[in-house]
Image: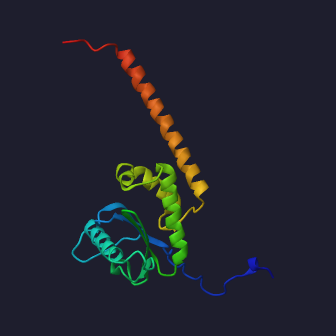
Amino acid sequence: SGLGSAYFVGPTPTPTPTRRMIKGIIIVNNNGQARICKFFQSVHEEGYSAEDAQQQVIRKVFQQVAQRPDSFCNYLEGSIPEWGDGTKLIYRHYATLYFVFAVDKLESDLGILDLIQVFVEALDKCFENVCELDLIFHSDKVHYILDEIVMGGMVLETNIVSILQCVNDQNKLHQKSLSKLNEALASSSRSKGPVPRR
């Protein structure tokens, strides 16, 4: 009998809830100001709104990674109680930014460090040496790049070529829609004729 012939006798096992590999992604600068945040697992704290609880988590994450010298290892275990005991922080510090991934404790530290590297390389290619200002003024594009890599807490893509191809396709669609909009606006203004002077 092959592997495909396996079957269960007795009650059907209840499906286990999907385990979120990545619980949150937080990018903060050296002063603790959040630049990009994505929470894939909600955080709760008694007496706080969801947004305030997220701000508390961002502060705790920054305090924990900022006090560590760059020579220390890049992960901390069980450090954010709002995400539960089975959480660890894996991060990289580049110039003025900390890229922090809060992940399930069973995840590979090196695998997540590589994932952060892929994300930063994709940003570098799209922005030609990414800096903090790119994250501020082009946050929509940064979110799009991140969505190509991680969605709903699960890793979608790690191949930098595939990620950049998707980003380039999106840029082409964006340019095409902008040119159509400009054409429509131009033809609309021509059909109305010159605006009479007062």
Q: Position of residue 108 (x, y in %)?
A: 54, 78
Choose between 93 and 21: the one closer to the eye: 93
Examine the rendered structure and indicate whether residue 61 appears above or below residue 192.
below
> Residue 29 appears in which quarter of the rendering?
bottom left
Quadrant where the N terminus sits is bottom right
Lateral position of residue 42 relative to residue 178, left or right: left
Examine the rendered structure and indicate whether residue 157 appears above or below residue 1.
above
Choose between 180 and 146: the one closer to the eye: 146
Lateral position of residue 194 relative to residue 151, left or right: left
Q: Position of residue 170 (x, y in %)?
A: 52, 45
Q: Position of residue 196 (x, y in %)?
A: 25, 12
> Residue 186 appears in which quarter of the rendering?
top left
Q: Which residue does the image show at 50% across and 61% down from the upper left?
A: 119
Instruction: Give the residue furthest to the front.
Output: 71
> Residue 37 appears in which quarter of the rendering?
bottom left
Q: Which residue does the image show at 28% across and 68% down from the upper left?
A: 55
